[in-house]
Image: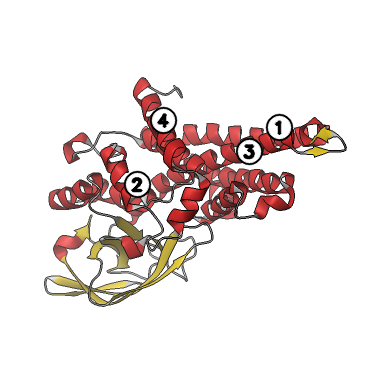
């Protein structure tokens, strides 16, 4: 398995690093997250101009024809900059659904709008009673002639307040926990009967509780087969986990490098902290945890691209390791920075918060360990 990057991928990495270095320091991120939408429309337009929003889409759909490896590379750099623009919900999650199962018209509208930056979308999948079981869906879609009427509620819908389209999983048949009977619908935002309760998350992003009260959608708004959305949702989940894992790896790299730099400058008993053997060991362990997670992320991503049989199980192992390594690196970075580690002025706290949220998305470390061994 060749894990080296191509020349084109290295150029992509360099362009993202330059953008983040020039325009995305921690003070700028804090300013952006304090805005009404919690991200920068100007940056989103720049992403479109640079071709980043076209990265994972097929050439016949107007994209660049990249794979999950390219997305991993981009998300790792986004993790280093703590980028808050809605690449994950709009490009990775909804983009995967439309690429895999969308009609020609849906691809033209959603993928075309995503690529040029004119359309933002998000995926409403989580329900309060479901926890990490994405087949636990009680939001229902009632058929009436040529239309469906959606009723129910979804939790933690990323960037819903800024979305033009919301992809919603709803039950059209079966019991509440059946894999069969789940259908994906594209809902216009705003729509009659659609209500949002918006709030900032602990890591500086934006999410919403979304309720549906007989929201009307047409049959042309169904994505994929009626009642057969479970495999599509699983594909979305796998790619989202890979993207989040790459983001976490970027964040962990910044944390251990910042910690090494700080301990070289901070003196205790007349010596830099980095001179103390026990702290050297601690930082070596931080580096090893990051390196192991990065290696497994690269392997899992390659297996997903190859559609290998053990890709799913490897992704479970990856998400467990990301949760474990992220907590270890984050906690030690905060501890070795002392009281400064949790101040808003120092970027260490912001990276640590983001790692803790990533652990909880699409199942935490304990959940994926259970899935891996079952």
Alpha carbon separation for disc pair 2 and 3:
26 Å
Alpha carbon separation for disc pair 4 and 2:
17 Å
Report the mark closest to the observer, 4 or 1.
4
- From the viewer's side, name the closer residue of 38 and 300: 38
Instruction: For label 1, count other residues whose C-alpha is less than 10 Å away and answer few (under 14), some (14-19) or many (20+).
Output: some
Q: Point out the residue furthest to the right here.
A: 269
- Counting residues from the N terminus, which is met first, the one under dot 4 or under dot 1? 4
Q: Earlier in the sequence, mark 3 or mark 4?
A: 4
- Ranked by sequence position, the earlier of labels 2 and 1 is 2
Q: CA distance from mark 2 to mark 1?
A: 36 Å
Q: Residue at x 46, y 55 (%)?
A: 31
Kind of element beneath mark 2: helix
Q: Position of residue 129 (x, y in %)?
A: 47, 71
Q: How far, Cα to Cα, is label 3 from label 1?
A: 13 Å
Which marked residue is nearer to the observer: mark 2 or mark 1?
2
**Residue linked to disc 2:** 43
Query: Front-most of 148 and 312?
Result: 148
**Residue shown at the point (43%, 43%) measured from the top left:** 243
- Residue located beneath label 4 in the image: 13
Question: Would you say residue 238 is visible in this rendering?
Answer: yes
Colouring method of the image: secondary structure
Give coordinates of residue 161: x percent, y percent.
34, 65
Q: For mark 4, does the 10 Å Cα neighbourhood hold few (<14), some (14 to 19), or many (20 or more) residues?
A: some
Q: Position of residue 92 (x, y in %)?
A: 35, 47
Find out whether the residues at labels 4 and 2 contact each other: C-beta distance under 8 Å: no
In the foreground, 38 or 297? 38
Q: Are marks 4 and 1 in contact (CB under 8 Å)?
A: no
What is the number of the mark on residue 258? 3
**Residue 284, numbered label:** 1
């Amino acid at each position: 398995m060749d894990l080296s990057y191509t020349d084109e991928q290295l150029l992509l990495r360099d362009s993202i690093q330059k953008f983040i270095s020039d325009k995305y320091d921690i003070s700028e991120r804090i300013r952006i997250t304090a805005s009404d939408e919690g991200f920068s429309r100007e940056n989103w337009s720049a992403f479109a101009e640079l071709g980043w929003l076209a990265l994972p889409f097929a050439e016949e759909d107007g994209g660049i024809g990249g794979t999950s490896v390219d997305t991993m590379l981009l998300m790792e750099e986004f993790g280093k900059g703590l980028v808050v623009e809605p690449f994950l919900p709009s490009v990775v999650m909804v983009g995967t659904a439309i690429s895999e199962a969308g009609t020609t018209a849906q691809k033209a509208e959603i993928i075309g709008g995503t690529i040029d930056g004119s359309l933002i979308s998000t995926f409403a999948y989580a329900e309060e009673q479901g926890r990490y079981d994405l087949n636990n869906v009680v939001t229902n879609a009632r058929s009436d002639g040529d239309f469906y009427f959606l009723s129910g509620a979804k939790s933690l819908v990323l960037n819903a307040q800024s979305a033009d389209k919301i992809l919603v999983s709803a039950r059209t048949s079966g019991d509440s926990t059946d894999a069969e009977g789940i259908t994906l619908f594209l809902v216009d935002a705003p729509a009659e009967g659609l209500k949002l309760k918006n709030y900032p998350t602990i890591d500086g992003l934006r999410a919403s509780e979304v309720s549906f009260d007989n929201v009307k959608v047409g049959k042309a708004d169904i994505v994929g087969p009626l009642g057969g959305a479970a495999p599509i949702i699983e594909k979305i989940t796998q790619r989202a986990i890979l993207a989040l894992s790459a983001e976490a790896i970027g964040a962990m790299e910044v944390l251990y490098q910042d910690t090494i730099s700080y301990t070289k400058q901070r003196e205790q008993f007349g010596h830099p902290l980095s001179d103390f053997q026990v702290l050297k060991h601690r930082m070596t362990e931080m580096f090893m945890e990051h390196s192991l997670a990065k290696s497994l992320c690269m392997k899992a991503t390659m297996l997903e691209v190859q559609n290998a049989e053990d890709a799913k199980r490897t992704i479970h192992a990856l998400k467990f390791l990301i949760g474990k390594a992220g907590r270890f690196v984050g906690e030690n970075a905060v501890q070795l920075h002392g009281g400064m580690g949790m101040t808003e002025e120092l970027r260490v706290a912001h990276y640590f918060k983001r790692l803790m949220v990533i652990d909880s998305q699409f199942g935490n470390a304990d959940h994926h360990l259970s899935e891996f061994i079952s």
